[in-house]
Image (spheres, helix red, strand yellow):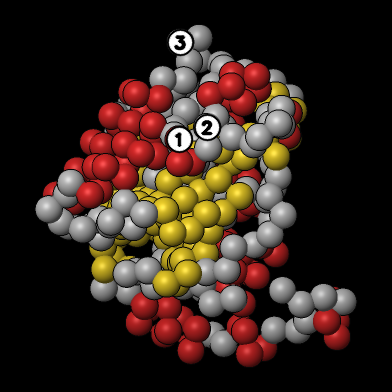
């Protein structure tokens, strides 16, 4: 068993303040004995407009936010690896990329995934969010990769609503799927836990859901649901952060690959799965 931490905090448009919050979560994780810290989507910043979202984005190797995390990890006495969502600039483009990075304990970026499904939603009596105005969609699933926890599959926020993505990650060997998010309050109240537990049961993987929480600007127009959580392959919520405030928090759970093995042995879904013969495609 290996201890994982799911982080929760409230990012604003101030990259310096957001980096300070992340450093707090890094040290909380180390002090708690976690080997990996999972951070939310858009941990570097949440801007007030599509134009500001694009303007603040930088290439990964020039991002003071990413560089700050890399330096912090290199200075730790105890090894910690970090999964973190950021924005990435696109040269000669009026949109940026929403990406998820894996940074190892030596401060190296070893994995990068670009969000496939963009959140374009107009909710009645709720927020109007058109992510595609400022973000360029990804075009490929990143194959799961080896970590101290097991094989991790990458997805981001709105990807959780598309089960074919998680099923593909499971087919490719994922033991764990992470969904770093900035869920709106209304969609979070209705679907956050439901979707997380469903993806865990669908794929028989651990699901780790770091989250943004609270108001991202002074007028409170953009608010995130929080409730960062870790779910086991049977759909049990093992740990969850409170949303009583926006203080940077972590929740912790052991990742036990024997649990993954047992669930898959007891209920051998992938041996029983029908594919192209019935549905016309395989995942």
User: Spatial distance from mark 3 to mark 2, Cα to Cα?
Assistant: 25 Å
- Residue marked by disc 3: 218
Secondary structure at badge 2 equals loop
User: Spatial distance from mark 1 to mark 3, Cα to Cα?
Assistant: 28 Å
- Residue marked by disc 1: 62
Question: Residue 226 versus residue 91: which sits nearer the camera?
Answer: 91
- Image coords of residue 51 (percent x, y): 65, 19
- Image coords of residue 190 (percent x, y): 59, 41
Residue 234 sits above or below residue 272 on the image: above
Residue found at x 87% / y 76%:
280
Secondary structure at badge 3 equals loop
Are the residues tagged 1 and 2 within 8 Å (C-beta)?
yes
Crowding around mark 2 (Cα neighbors within 10 Å: few <14, some 14 to 19, many 20+) is: some
Crowding around mark 1 (Cα neighbors within 10 Å: few <14, some 14 to 19, many 20+) is: few
- Residue marked by disc 2: 58
Question: Residue 129 versus residue 237: which sits nearer the camera?
Answer: 129
**If the image is split into quadrants, where does the C terminus sit?**
bottom right
**If the image is split into quadrants, where does the N terminus sit?**
bottom left
Residue 205 visible in the displayed image = no
Secondary structure at badge 1 equals helix
Residue 237: image quadrant is bottom left
- Image coords of residue 177 (percent x, y): 50, 62
């Amino acid at each position: 068993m290996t201890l994982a931490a799911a982080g929760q905090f409230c990012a604003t448009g101030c990259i310096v303040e957001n980096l300070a919050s992340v450093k707090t979560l890094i040290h909380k994780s180390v002090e708690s004995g976690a080997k990996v810290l999972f951070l939310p989507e858009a941990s570097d910043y949440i801007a007030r407009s599509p134009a500001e979202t694009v303007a603040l984005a930088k290439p990964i190797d020039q991002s003071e936010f990413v560089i700050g995390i890399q330096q912090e990890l290199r200075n730790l006495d105890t090894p910690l690896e970090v999964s973190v969502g950021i924005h990435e600039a696109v040269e000669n483009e009026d949109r940026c990329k929403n990406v998820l990075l894996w940074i190892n304990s030596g401060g190296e970026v070893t994995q990068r995934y670009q969000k496939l499904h963009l959140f374009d939603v107009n909710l009645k009596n709720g927020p109007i969010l058109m992510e595609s105005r400022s973000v360029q969609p990804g075009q490929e699933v990143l194959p799961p990769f080896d970590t101290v926890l097991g094989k991790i599959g990458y997805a981001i926020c709105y990807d959780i609503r598309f089960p074919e993505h998680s099923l593909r990650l499971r087919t490719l060997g994922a033991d764990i799927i992470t969904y770093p998010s900035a869920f709106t309050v209304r969609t979070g109240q209705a679907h956050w836990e439901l979707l997380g537990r469903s993806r865990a049961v669908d794929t028989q993987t651990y699901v780790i859901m770091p989250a943004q929480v609270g108001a991202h600007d002074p007028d409170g127009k953009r608010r995130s649901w929080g409730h960062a959580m870790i779910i086991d392959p049977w759909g049990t919520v093992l740990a969850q952060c409170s949303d009583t405030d926006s203080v940077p928090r972590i929740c912790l759970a052991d990742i036990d690959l024997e649990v993954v093995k047992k669930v898959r042995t007891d209920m051998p879904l992938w041996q029983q799965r029908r594919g192209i013969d019935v549905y016309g495609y395989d995942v």
